[in-house]
Every structure is written in C-alpha cells, then in structure tokens.
Amino acid sequence: MRRTLLFTGIMATALVGTVASTGVSLAQSPAEAVAARQQVMKDKGAAVFRTIRPFVQNGTGAIADVQAAAATLASHNGKYAALWPRGTELGVAGSKTKPELWQQTDRLNQLIADMERNATAMNVAARSGDAAQIRTAFAGVTASCNACHDAYQSR
Ligand code: HEC
C-alpha cells in the first residue's frame, strides 16, 4: 500500500510513520532525500562489510555485533519505497540512482521484497548464533544488495 501511494505520487500521510524513524522529515527537499537514502545505504554497508563479512570470512568479531548489524539491516524493512521519492534521480544533489528505478515499479518491488526476506533471514540467523546459518544468510543478503545495485545504482 505504502509503495503504491508513493509511486503514484501521493506521499503525505502514508510516509509519516516510516520516514520519521529513519530520521527524515516529511518536508524533505530532494537534497535531503538523497542524503537520507545514502545514509541508510552507508549504514547497510557498515553492517555488511565491516561487521558481518569479517565474522563470516575470518571468524573475527563478536556475535553481539553481528546481531546488532543484522538488526540494523532488518530495521530497514518496510522503509525502502520511502527512500526514493520522485525528483531524486541521478544528477540531483549527488544522487547515484538511475532514472529506471522509477519506471520499473514491479521489478523494484521484487528486489525490495527479496532484500527484506534476506534481511529477516539474516536477523534470525544472527540471533541463533549458528555460524553456518549466518554464512548462508550473508550470501543471501549480499546477493540482494548486488541485484539492486546492478539494476539501479550508477557507478
Ligand atoms: C532496492 C535497491 C537497493 C538495495 C536492496 C540495496 N541498495 Fe544500496 N544502493 C541502491 C541505490 C539505488 C544506491 C544509489 C543511491 C543514491 O546515491 O541515489 C545505493 C547506494 C549504496 C551505497 C553507497 C552510499 C553512498 O552514497 O555512500 C552503499 C554503501 C550501499 N548502497 C550498500 C548497500 C548494501 C550493503 C545493501 C544490502 C544490505 C544495499 N545497499 C541494498 C539501491 C539498493
């Protein structure tokens, strides 16, 4: 529902709950929206590459940190659509989002759904503390990051 509203451009009330918790105000300018989106992505990068990956690949780091990182990833579930208001495509305020993202709603929603499912699995795995389960979930998460970046992130 939220996504439908967003992509038809009726953003007012649907976003209040979701956007507030990522620290973005409703009266967001395009520059603020881009900055907020990039901050969410940086948080994801830190969780995945600084915390979960070293744990999976080298066995370094504390499980409590992996759990916190996984919780961060899962906390973004339900908030993706709000990250890409119209008018924030490549060329606007340092945005690196290809304009195709706004033209491919079905594909975007599928990528988001995959990301959310994999983030949930990561969260469950982290809480289990089971290294094999965490490794499997990590592969799913990174596949989801990469799939969306391949489609919509300009490099
Ligand atoms: C639904 C699509 C999507 C998913 C899923 C996604 N990203 Fe992104 N990501 C993007 C797009 C688009 C950009 C470019 C954002 C911009 O600048 O407009 C981006 C940018 C980034 C950046 C650069 C941020 C900056 O400007 O400094 C990082 C880091 C990043 N993503 C990490 C991740 C990680 C890690 C994951 C998986 C846990 C992930 N992303 C999942 C679409 C996605």
Image (cartoon, rainbow, N blue to C red):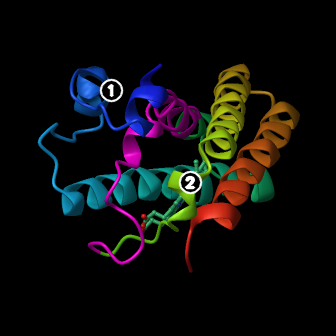
Residue displayed at 88% across by 36% down: 132
Q: Tell me where residue 122 appears, x and y as whole percent.
A: 69, 32
Q: Which residue is mark 1?
A: 18
Please state, as top left, top right, bottom left or bottom right, where the C terminus lies in the image: bottom right
Vertical relation: 75 (above or below) 55: above
Report the number of discs.
2
Within the magenta stretch, is there residue 150? Answer: no
The type of residue carrying mark 2 is: Gln
Instruction: Name the disc covering residue 103, or none.
Output: 2
Local crowd size for mark 2, using a 10 Å CA cut-off: few (<14), some (14–19), many (≥20): few
Within the magenta stretch, is there residue 90? Answer: yes
The secondary structure type at the circle numbered 2 is helix
Residue displayed at 23% across by 59% down: 30
In the image: residue 76, left or right of residue 113: left
In the image: residue 135, left or right of residue 46: right
Q: Tell me where residue 11 appears, x and y as whole percent.
A: 28, 32
Vertical relation: 5 (above or below) 31: above
In the image: residue 115, left or right of residue 58: left
Residue displayed at 30% across by 37% down: 22
The type of residue carrying mark 1 is: Thr
* Residue 7 occupies quadrant: top left
Q: CA distance from mark 1 to mark 2?
A: 23 Å
Vertical relation: 104 (above or below) 121: below
Q: Earlier in the sequence, mark 1 or mark 2?
A: 1
Q: Tell me where residue 49 appears, x and y as whole percent.
A: 60, 60
Instruction: Name the disc covering residue 87, or none.
Output: none
Q: Nearer the viewer's eye, disc 1 or disc 2?
A: 2
Q: Which residues are magenta?
A: 67-93
Residue displayed at 16% across by 37% down: 26
* Residue 136 occupies quadrant: top right
Q: Tell me where residue 47 appears, x and y as whole percent.
A: 53, 49
